Image (tube, helix red, strand yellow):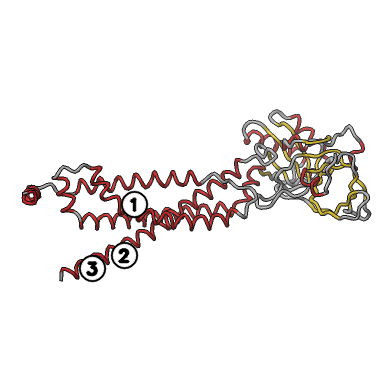
Amino acid sequence: MLKGKVRSGLRSKGIRSTLVVVQFAISIALIICTMVVFDQLNYLKDRHIGLDKHNVMVLDNTRRLDKNMEVFKEKLDAQSGIIKASYTNNPFPGVGNTTVFQTAGTDDNRIMGTYFADDDHLEVLKIEMVKGRYFSKEFKSDSSVCVLNEAAVKELGWTDDPINQKLTNFNGPEPFDMTIIGVMKDFNFESFKSPIRPLVLMYTPTANRILIRYEGESKEAIAKIETLWKEYASNEPFEYGFLDQRYNDLFKEDQKLSELITVLTSIAIVVACLGLFGLASFTAEQRTKEIGIRKVMGASVTTISSLLSKEFMVLVGIAFVIASFMAYYLMDRWLETFCLQDSTILGGVFNQWSAGHSHSLAYHQLSFYKSCPFKPNYIASVRIVAE
């Protein structure tokens, strides 16, 4: 009968231990995944993408200004709090069109992204030039020139200076040649999940979209721009957006994934803690007399804590190893979808988990020590054993 009780107790303890390992493995894996997702999204939000997306308002319907497009921009530039405005046909983020190009003297076709912008475009977005110059109203010939990004120069295979080289544009009824006047630094104009593509920037004085860089509070800028809009397009709706928000929308689905993982992590942690509490209670019940005797014999909290912690440390250690492999596999696959990745998150994951586990374990150990009875019959039992 005693043998049966022992077997039953061992079987019950084994089941409880297995459940604790499974629950903690899921919880730790979700915690790691949550930290990876949060760190990656924050990295993308904070990283310099080759342009300054902050404090830039976007108006998408400027064609409705009709003949007032140029004067509208002039009035904007004259407003206090408005640094500079720029017309472009590019949706941002994204690219307006793709066009087939050829370098002079070759039949090698290259498909590259293209969009149009005015002479203030780089100043508004704070995009840096690498070589040559940008568009300028001082040069009447700028209607037949273009500026490339660094990726386009690499795509065309130029190792020498590309300035003043000819590029044949096949976008139109007849091919026409364009002169390269400058090279700008690469910047992310599309999704962060794809590499920066070759880009050809061409000149236009006006377009269907205007980017407005402002300083100070956005509410003040909105009010000034809306007043000016109503002056020149009173019958048209005033519709605007912000460039940084549009870039953040690129990983809206990943943000939803982050929120879902956070909810699942919270649930899993609660379930795992309940399992740990259950195992702790079971262990305390099984070893109550032993702990009480050790207290009477003068064992310190540290000694008893070490005794009790070994089993839990092994279980949580097993769970952590399993969770690490699970999380690494899942997050490695997820991070592969991004061209830009943050690879400095594991240290934070280990630190957070270790700190949380240490506090939890210390709490349980102290609870065990305080809950064990300290009564005369225990003292008598200890004396009998000692004698």
> Can you tell which quarter of the image residue 44 is in?
top right
Left or right of residue 87: residue 345:
left
Extreme-front residue of the structure? 387
2 vs 1, front mark: 1
Q: Is residue 26 left or right of residue 190?
A: left
Alpha-carbon span between mark 2 and mark 1 = 17 Å
Residue at image mark 2:
15
- Which residue is at a point 45% across and 46% down the rendered structure image? 350
- For the point 92% across and 36% down, the residue is 140
Circle 3 is placed at which residue position?
8
User: Which quadrant holds the N terminus?
Assistant: bottom left
In whole angstroms, how far apart are the C-alphas of marks 2 and 3?
Answer: 11 Å
Q: Is residue 48 left or right of residue 374?
A: right
SS label for mark 1: helix
Foreground pick, 383 / 288: 383
Q: Amino acid at mark 3?
A: Ser
